[in-house]
Image (spheres, helix red, strand yellow):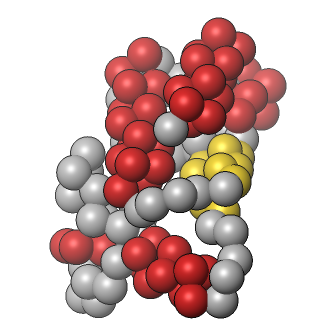
Amino acid sequence: HCLWPSRHTRYHVGTSGNRTDVVEAFVRACERHGLMTGLYYCSWDNRHKLGSRTPSDLPWNSAFTTRAYQDFQLGQIDELLRGYGPVGQLWIDIPHVLPRDFRQALYEHATSL
C-alpha cells in the first residue's frame, strides 16, 4: 500500500479511508526540523507482481522480478524522488529480487535525481 497518491496504482492513500499523503507529511516534518529526508521502498510486492515471484512464492534465493514489475518499480521510485523535493537517502529493501543490471540502472537513475 503506497503511503502517497501514486499514479501507478489505485492501491494508495488517495483511495483509502484516510487520504493523508504520509510521505508529504513526513517530508515536511523533516524540513521543519532541519532533517534530511530518507525514504524506504520495498521490492517485495505481493499485490503488483506483474509476473514476478516473491519470497512468499518461492525459496528466498529463487525470487525474481519481471521487466513489467521493474518498470512499475522504477516509475514509483521516480515519482517519489521527483515529487517530494530533495531526498538524501533512498533505501530499497529486498534488492536481491531485482537483476543486478536493473539494480545498477535503478541506483544510477536515483542518484541522478
- Look at the picture and state if 18 lies above or below 2: below
Q: Quadrant of residue 31?
A: bottom right
* Residue drawn at point x = 36 percent, y = 67 percent: 4
Compared with residue 89, is residue 94 higher up or lower down, i.e. above or below?
above
The number of callouts visible is 0
Q: Which residue reaches farthest front?
A: 34
Work out whether residue 71 can be spotted.
Answer: yes
Q: Name the foreground residue: 97 vs 33.
A: 33
Q: Nearer the viewer, residue 48 or 99?
A: 99
Quadrant in which the N terminus is drawn: bottom left
Q: Position of residue 8 (x, y in %)?
A: 26, 45
Residue 63 position (above or below residue 99): below
Quarter residue 12 falls in: bottom left
Asked if residue 99 shows in the view, the reply is: no
Q: Position of residue 93 (x, y in %)?
A: 70, 47
- Is residue 24 or residue 76 the one in the foreground? 24
Q: As drawn, which residue projects farthest toward the right?
A: 61
**Horizontal side of residue 61 vs 31, given as left or right:** right
Q: Left or right: 35 with respect to 51?
A: right
At 63% from the left and 67% from the top, the residue drawn is 37
Q: Residue 68 location, x and y as percent? A: 36, 21
> Does residue 89 appear left or right of residue 28 in this picture?
right
Measured as percent of width and height from the top left, residue 43 is found at 59, 41
**Residue drawn at point x = 70 percent, y = 14 percent:** 100
Front position in the image: 82 or 15: 82
Which residue lies at the image location 31% right of the left edge and 74% below the top edge? 13
